[in-house]
Amino acid sequence: MKKIKSTWSASLVFVVMMVLVLSGCGNSNNGESAGSSASSSESPSASTSASAAPSPSASASPSAAASGDGIANPRVAFVYIGPPGDGGWTFQHDQGVKYMEKELGIKADTVENVPESADAERIITELAQNHDIIFTTSFGYMDYTLNVAKKFPNVKFEHAGGYKTNDNMATYFGKNWEASYLSGIAAGKMTKKNHLGYVAAFPIPELIYNINAFTLGAQSVNKDVKVDVVWTNTWFDPTTERNAAMSLLDKGADVLMAYQDSPASLQAAAEKGAMAGGNDSDMTRYAPKAYLTNPIWNWGPYYVKKVKALMDGTWTNDQYLGSFTDGMVDIAPIGESVPDDVKKLVEDQKAKFLAGDDNIYSGPILDQSGAEKIPSGKSLTDAEILEMNWFVQGVEGTIPQ
Amino acid sequence: MDTFTQIVIAAISSGTPLLFAALGGILIERSGIIQLGAEGIMLLGAVISCMTFIHTGSLPLALLAVAGISIALGLVHAFMTVTLRANQTVSGLAMTLFGTGLSAYLGKSVAGTPIPGSVPKLDLDFLDGVPFLSDVFGHLNVLTWFSFALVVVLHLFIHRTSWGLHLRAIGDNPATADVMGIRVQTFRYGYVIAGTILIGLAGADMLLAYSPTWTEGMTAGRGWIAVALIIFARWNPVRALLCAYFFGAMDTIGFKIQLIGSEIPSYFLKMIPYVVTILVLMYLGWRSRNKLSGTPQSLGLPYIREQRF
């Protein structure tokens, strides 16, 4: 009797341990799990590609097609920094992937929660062995993508947000500063205290040119407006984001903008009777009354275009910069508390961006110290905007060097 | 409202989830079981409260559901560590991995859906006009008041009752406690489960009162800070309250300093709580270098009756 009992409990332990360990591995966002989900996402790709791949020597050089020849049924992979359920950045990429799958009738493989570390290089390498084109959708994958691209000259790579390319590696991003300018117009009109707040993730050019654009937009309709900036040094941490937002509201800001991945700032503003916008995707549902608007991404058409180019054999390694004109950059529906005349101001400016004939970084523009950074009659080129490292006049905050 | 009041308000609101988790951890570790699963348990508590609240619209039911899942998790941890005497560190880490993964999976259906209400607030009108007190205590929610009460109750329980004496005994020297006739295994089960409920409640508080939408991984490491707070507070509920609010305040003070327009890089400001933690630990360690540290003596050691050490 004793013996039976101990065997029974031992096997129970084993089962419990297995459940714990397996479920832990399957879903957590550490490197191990990213690895296991990478390998699990390879099996469907192997089955879809079995019928499609023209050359059987898939392991060494996946797309045996020389440049100029199309691939009838390309194997496509995407690397995500977060889960598609983040309601922001990765969510929008996932929407783009779904759009592409529907338009072209192919299935793509995706790997979620890939950290921006050496793990990324391992996962991209694994994917490169049996895919024709790989999209890496976060700035931090830049060097890892480049390393793998050099090792797999026959695979095409597309990196979001970076500046390094290779013969088989292209980059893509969009002029989201134009959308930030539009949210600035709405914010400048809606503030009663002429005091805006900006919850900013990291002190990098992407944030700086968006903060500047937001400020310039607000100033275009409200001369006296000032923008307070705080850095959270995180893309995603609802508690920290909320504290940052609360500090801005405590200081007197009554319209906030948050370049973060969670809606925490919007929720904090709603609680305090202020207004706010978020980032990346439409955040109306989190606080409809308090919602302003914010820039959003629409990646689908670009994914269709590049995968189609690969099918036609016309793929190129350009550094693509989308805008309102091609729909990659857009602005979320303006919140219900914003009056129609403000909406019209935003729409009018959007029409100018759509026509593609307005550069918001046209002189004269002063920096924080009052020195003239862009003289009258001059405009910044896209390349200059993408490496901006100074704040315009009206921004209150410092850029850690 | 002056800056100090603002900081106190922020400290209490962001410190409350930490306080719940630290109190739960203290209860568990006082009984001699290491508790490293806080991050996972908090996430599960948050996601379960969110799902129940959205599907039933009832806050009490949501809290009951959190208690339910926490009891289940507590039972598993107690079974592993007390009955099977498995490695307590590994069991706790497994709990964190398990909770992180399962909460992400369960949360997919409610991600991005705001909860249909909020935790009721206790409006103390008689405080109106009293400068500092009305701002800080005038409109706190009931969970925060519950956490205040819990600190007092746990403090009295641990230090002033015979049950508390038993709790300390099974954490310090289970063999002696056993000889005294205290059922070590039963009590450890009870305290692990009770403590896990409090940690689950920490996650629920974070979601219901602080950041009212489920987002995957929303605790963002707060569970680990709670684990550190247990040690920082040296297993004492009142000190846990002070430490939790200290960390809560530090979350805000960094931003306040940025907004004054100081030239200190924000990266340094973000390090403040951790640097202060190290300094305080060093100071306390130095001051009490010849005394007992307050660590339950048998923390992490499984109790096996009649085994000699």
Image (spheres, rainbow, N blue to C red):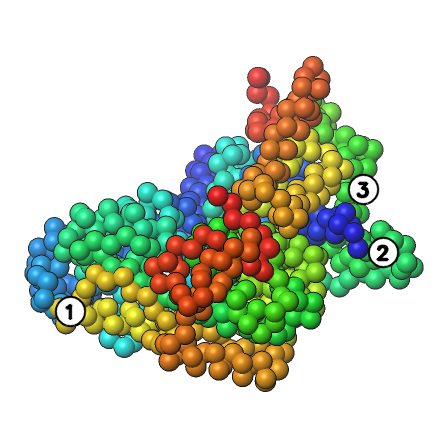
Residue A69 falls in which quadrant of the image?
bottom left
Residue lying at 24% horizontally and 68% vertically, measured from the top left: A306
Instruction: Locate residue B74 relative to residue B236 in the image: left or right.
Output: left
Residue beneath the point at 31% across and 62% down: A172
Image quadrant in which you'd find residue B164? top right
In the picture, measured across the screen, residue B143 lies left or right of residue A339, that is right
Q: Is residue B24 visible?
A: no
Does dot 3 land on a helix, a strand or a loop? helix
Give the amino acid at mark 1.
Thr
Q: Chain of mark 1?
A: A
A339 over B30 or under it: above or below: below
Instruction: Looking at this view, name the residue that lies furthest to the front.
Output: A376
Provide the residue designation for mark 1. A314
Please report the residue visible at 29 percent of the width from the left and 47 percent of the height from the top: A144
SS type, badge 1: loop
- Does any portion of residue A140 appear in the rendered image? yes
**Residue B224 in picture, x, y percent from top left:** 56, 41
Amino acid of disc 3 = Val
Q: Is residue B58 left or right of residue A328?
A: right
Looking at the image, do the residues carrying marks 2 and 1 touch, with CB atoms under 8 Å apart? no
Mark 2 sits on what residue?
B134
Same chain, marks 1 and 3? Answer: no
**Callout 3: residue from which chain?**
B
Q: Which residue is mark 3?
A: B152
Tell us which disc is closer to us: 2 or 3.
Answer: 2
Q: Position of residue A196 (x, y in %)?
A: 62, 63
For marks 2 and 3, the one nearer the N-term is: 2
Residue A393 x/y as whole percent: 56, 59
Image-quadrant location for residue A139 = bottom left
